[in-house]
Amino acid sequence: MSIRTEHEIHGRRKGRNVGVGIMLAGFVVLIMALTFVKITQIDFANAPGTVGPASGTEVTD
Amino acid sequence: MMTDVTNTPVQQNEAELGDYFALMKPRVMQLVVFTAVVGMLAAPVSVHPLIGFASILFVAIGAGASGALNMWWDADIDAVMRRTSKRPIPAGKVTPGEAMSLGVALSGLSVMMLALSANLLAAFMLAFTIFFYAVVYSMWLKRATPQNIVIGGAAGAFPPVIGWIIATGTFSVEAWLMFALIFMWTPPHFWALALFMRSDYDDANVPMLTVTHGRPATRRHIIAYTVLLAILAVGTGFTAIGGPIYLAVAVVLNVLFLMGAWRIWHRDEEDAEEDNYLVERKFFRLSLYYLFAHFGAILLEAALKPWGLGGWS
């Protein structure tokens, strides 16, 4: 038989843990969104070392 | 026999999430967020909304971290002063060690994340601001000199500069004008508070001007700083971040502010005690609207520019 003692402090701890969990989840979503925005802002076509449409085919010897 | 009885020590005053949030001085954070947003939006470079949002969030976290470090360091003072005695550490809800850990961890996180979301210069300025508030102001100046509020006020004045750097990546005169506005506003704001909080700072042995130089000297300092602030605030109206709306707001509010400071200067303690520091309390309340309205007007000028209405052009 198990003893289950529900105390007001358990409720408080649960609230704290749920709050931290929600904040961590929000942080993960924010980082993902930031990464997406940062990557889509990069102009890959004209990045150094790449062949852009204006420069034609890459020159190799 | 197995039981569910926990072995974790039970602390009667155990903190809730809100107590950790209170460590971050949410009211100061509001001012930091507002002025940083104005600095970012007044800059002549647009920022992607999500990058702007995330960057301001990290600035707010950095400000909160410095607030937690301040509460850790000043826990002994806070316990003595009536205004601060209910803060989480003196109330026994959060331990000083927890506050310090939270402050250090969030400082590192906020600076690192701002470097990633905005730029290195903005991150450096945030790190410097946290250092200035937690170390220069809280640890060095606050208990050592009556100039604590004057020099320490710089910490609260950096957020619009950081906001500007988030957008532009560089410093500029306009950013430093916004800095100067808060820097010059801070001393009269806090000295008015010190006048009507009476014995709080005396009890805590904090060398506020009221304690070291007396109340008449504090009244003289308030009028001197208010005159300098008025010149600066109205002068800003003729720069790139100003405009007709800002200038109108600045003229009206600075006349009111000067009148308040003048009345404080011409009162003595007997008059003040008679009406329970009514003039000083009104001046303090006005100072809150003063800063909000000036930065609100800068924001409005910037917001109207796409329609050719804001600013002087």
Image (cartoon, coloured by chain):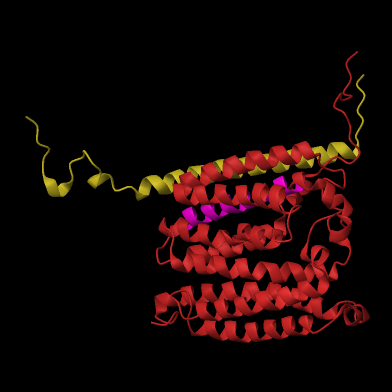
Chain colours: A yellow, B red
Q: Quadrant of the C terminus of chain A?
A: top left
Residue B11: percent from left, percent from top: 89, 35
Is B70 colored magenta in this rendering?
yes
Q: Is residue B192 left or right of residue B60?
A: right
Vertical relation: B299 (above or below) B264 = above
Visible residue check, residue B82: no
Q: Is residue A38 above or below residue B149?
A: above
Q: Main secondary structure of the magenta part?
A: helix
Residue extending farthest top: B1
Q: At which x and y percent is residue B258? A: 68, 83
- Residue B150, given in percent of the width and then of the height, sits at 66, 63
Q: Residue at x 47, y 53 (%)?
A: B51
- The number of callouts visible is 0
Q: Quadrant of residue A44?
A: top left
Q: Residue at x 66, y 43 (%)?
A: A22
Residue under the point 61% across and 53% down: B60
Magenta stretch, residue numbers: B49-71
